[in-house]
Image (spheres, helix red, strand yellow):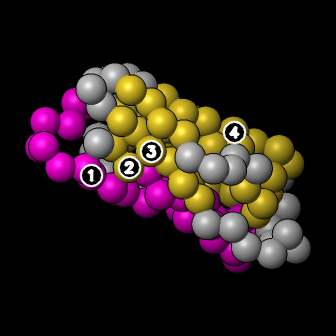
Amino acid sequence: MTVLLISACSEDEADSITLTTTGTTELYSVTNQSADIKFKAGSSWKASCAANWLTVSPKSGEAGNNIITVATTATNRTGNSRVTHLTIESGGQEKTVVVKQS
């Protein structure tokens, strides 16, 4: 059983990026499991993540309400949880979302 855990750090509402996804999202499966990260951006934005076991779509967009979908591309066979950070940048501000696959 695989668990995908997503958590986010929240900051002041006046920032250019406001995460509307709250709490923890857990997905149980092996591969191709996805979760949505909802946020509001004050200007155009871009997202980046270095993990090769996670896809991010879309990787950029315009101001307003947005949804990024992250999906696992491989089963975690390490026996340990693996963690990566998804960074959303807009208007000189950044928000980081922690993605954990167990």
Q: Are marks 4 and 2 in contact (CB under 8 Å)?
A: no
Tell me where residue 77 sits by quadrant: top left
- Magenta: main secondary structure equals strand
Q: Position of residue 33 (x, y in %)?
A: 42, 25
Q: For the residues marked 1 and 4, what is the alpha-carbon distance in whole angstroms? A: 23 Å
Say whether disc 2 or disc 3 marks the residue closer to the N-terminus. 3
Mark 3 lies on a secondary structure that is strand
Cα separation, mark 1 vs mark 2, equals: 6 Å
Query: Mark 3 and mark 2 in contact (Cβ < 8 Å)?
Result: yes
Which mark, residue 94? none
Write down the residue under mark 3.
Answer: 5
- Tell me residue 30's x, y (percent): 28, 24
Q: For marks 3 and 1, give the CA distance.
A: 10 Å
Q: Name the kind of residue labelled 3 in the image.
A: Leu
For numbered disc 1, what is the local secondary structure? Answer: strand
Q: Quadrant of the N terminus?
A: top left
Return the residue at label 4: 67
Q: Residues within 10 Å of mark 1 (few under 14, many from 20)?
A: some
Residue 82 disc label: 1
Visible in this render: residue 43?
no
Q: Is residue 27 above or below residue 80?
A: above
Task: Give the CA distance from mark 4 to mark 2.
Answer: 19 Å
